[in-house]
Amino acid sequence: METPEFRLWAHKFADWMADYYENIEDLPVKSMVCPGEILSKLPELPPEGGESMSQLFEDFQSIILPGMTHWQSPNFFAYFPANGSLPSILAEMLTAAMGAQCMIWETSPAAAELEERVMDWLKVMTGLPSGWSGVIQDTASTATLAAILSAREKCGFFSSNETGLSQHQQLRVYCSTETHSSIDKAVKIAGIGRQNLVKVIIDKQFRMDSEALRSAIQSDIELGFKPCCVVATLGTTSSVSIDPLKEIAEVCKELGVWLHVDAAYAGSALLLPEFRWMIEGIDQVDSFVFNPHKWLFTNFDCSAYFVKDKESLIKTFEILPEYLKTGTRGLVNDYRDWGVPLGRRFRALKLWFVIRSYGVEGLKEAIRNHIEYACWFETQVAESLEFEIMATRHLSVVCFRFHPKHKDDQAELDRLNATLLEAINRSGKAYLTHTKLNGQYVMRMAIAQTRVKRENVQNTWELIKRIASEL
Ligand SMILES: *Cc1c(COP(=O)(O)O)cnc(C)c1O
């Protein structure tokens, strides 16, 4: 393809993108395809000769699009969102055009320095300590892996990277029973082993019990284990519970254990001063992650990882083959040493576009609106005779279930709610997902999509009530 044709298609695609957003509510939020349906429409062998862009675009629309779930629909209330925004998309277009690989400063100086600057902005915006350092990772899972690996190395005086783990005391990692599965994954990968991930009990609000944490660590020390890392969660995935950071931080300080904070979704709420209580105790924290791709309107993927002491991070990951040696080493940030991959996308650009385009006030207003819509939804549920709230609402997620009068059999309620959720999603008008709390099936209404308006939430509440009444 030559540039005249590229120009033509780029204009067409720009129109398609704008149309997509203008008409997104007409599409079923959750894709309705069956397993294998898309696969059956794709030829088993790649084409020998090149095909035309018009053929490609036609197939994109007829084959691919029906198989997509529309995460950017304002009626997307499932999981946590993977948000984007129009300024972010424009930045991604430029990023794709330059196709830069930003592994070290020299391979794209502006990418490295912009990353440093926007991460500093995020610190100011969220109230994280000014002396910390930030780096963009692809996902929270990767950032948490980096944290656990850094904690592991620090525990072993940075020797297990060289000698392996066999000569070391058995390491232990702690999190609550409500913690995200990425912690389990990280201890598996880090060679610590899932059996050495201690799941601390939670209180009635689904928060980690810090006294139980203290006893778990103390008894592990007595048994000859080496406590290595505690992972606290701000905004658990099921119910958005907020672990008591201050108390956990005190335990970690007293017992000398690395403290990592997973605030994947909830971290964005720190833009609002009224939620800064969540990070009371932050000075004692060693590492912290939150996802601008969840609730800060930045296209997937973009995960902001912060560390108190960047040397621990760099000592864990750095490796210096001859072909990567440069004259600027030590003067600049070479982010390849700050995480798992060598090659890195230019993710800072979209974050820069988003922060500048919205302005901090604009971002705060959008987040506040989501929380206000969630309050409204919570009130509707609480006042309804047929529905009930299943967990204290934090931020913009409401956990609730359908509970018609005189139906109190738990297994039956579980089935009824699963049927209701399925019917809501099949309507194409909204997409919600579920979790289990105290063993009970619970629907989650996560209100954090960039384009969601009050009326989307109102219409969805009407939809839920109508479908429930027809069951
Ligand atoms: C979403 C989520 C994660 C995982 O995020 P990825 O960026 O997809 O790895 C981790 N922890 C919590 C609390 C989450 O909500």
Image (cartoon, rainbow, N blue to C red):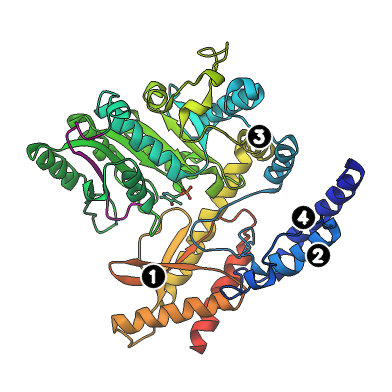
Q: Going from the N terminus, do you reach mark 4 or mark 1 first?
A: 4
Q: Say above or below: 45 vs 323.
A: below
* Whether the residue under disc 2 has CB within 8 Å of ligand 1: no
Q: CA distance from mark 2 to mark 4?
A: 15 Å
Comparing 307 with 22, the one in front is 307
- Identify the mark at residue 58; answer none if there is no mark: 2
Mark 4 falls on what kind of element? helix
- Does 331 lie within the magenta span? no
User: What amino acid type is highlighted by mark number 2?
Assistant: Glu
At label 1, counting other C-alpha atoms closer than 10 Å, the crowd grade (few under 14, some 14-19, many 20 or more) is: many
| Secondary element at image label 2 | helix
State if disc 2 and disc 3 touch (CB < 8 Å): no
Q: Amino acid at mark 1?
A: Val
Please give left or right for residue 88 compared with residue 185 in the image: right
Residue tagged by mark 4? Answer: 17
- As for residue 173 lying within the magenta part, the answer is yes
Tell me which segment is drawn in magenta. Answer: 165-180
The circle on residue 442 is 1
Image coords of residue 401 (percent x, y): 40, 74
| Residue 349 marker | 3
Residue, x 90% and y 47% (percent of image)? Answer: 5
Q: CA distance from mark 4 to mark 1?
A: 35 Å
Type of secondary structure dominating the magenta stretch? loop
Foreground residue, 338 or 29?
Answer: 338
User: In which image quadrant can residue 407 be found?
Assistant: bottom left
- Is residue 277 at least partly visible in the picture? no
Q: CA distance from mark 1 to mark 2?
A: 40 Å
